Amino acid sequence: DYPVMQAADNEYYLTRDFYKNSSSAGSIFMDYRNNPRQADRNIILYGHAMRDRSMFGNLKEYPTDEEKCGKYKKIYLDLGDARMEYEVFSAYIADASCNYRQTEFKNDEEYAHFLKEIQSRSVYDFGVKLSEEDRILTLSTCNRTHIKNGRAVVHAKWIRR
């Protein structure tokens, strides 16, 4: 339950809170390329995985915790006056250079290939079917437990507004 911030780049809110004050915890923030007034094909949210489990602290180990993956499958995102409901379809640990943060797609075929690729990376089969008409939410936080420059990544399909 955090406000989602956005700036002209993906650096500003790494070290600033809701009030724009300096903060080691930073903020949860939306990728600068996303439009918060519409459901882009891939809305990306970033946040630090704090040791006290705040921000995305609970997300850090999600991809490697079968019990959590089985129990916590819904994500809610409030965008203005709309509450978006998402269902998790993929969770994994990736290198920061991995292409899971793509927001623009040339056509439906490229987007369908992207969806297939990120779903195939999942540690667990969530049993969710995807198509090029689907909109997704991506959550990303640092996880250097398994990979030096690792990220815990969770993708979820928009199911209801």
Image: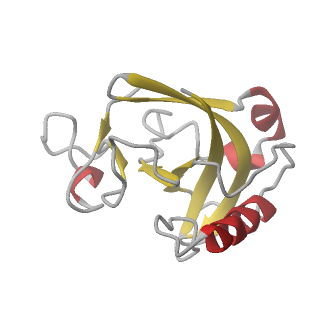
Q: Residue at x 36, y 49 (%)?
A: 30
Q: Position of residue 39 (x, y in %)?
A: 46, 44
User: From this viewpoint, is residue 102 visible?
Assistant: yes
**3 and 35: which one is in front?**
35
Q: Residue at x 20, y 46 (%)?
A: 16
Report x, y in % for residue 18: 21, 35
Left or right of 118, for residue 44: left
Where is residue 89? Give x, y as percent.
Answer: 74, 46
Which of these two is toward me, 145 or 30?
30
Quarter of the image for residue 94 reads bottom right
Reply above or below: 160 against 90: above
Determine whether 98 is above or below 60 in the image: below
Residue 148 % position (x, y): 57, 72
Q: Quadrant of residue 156?
A: top right
Query: From the image, which quarter does the N terminus lie in?
Result: top left
Residue at (53, 77) in percent of width and height: 97
Residue 146 visible in the picture: no
Q: Residue at x 70, y 63 (%)?
A: 118
Residue 23 higher or lower than 93, as above or below: above
Q: Would residue 44 be found to the left or right of residue 10 on screen? A: right
The image's colour scheme reads secondary structure
How many discs mark residues in the rendered view?
0
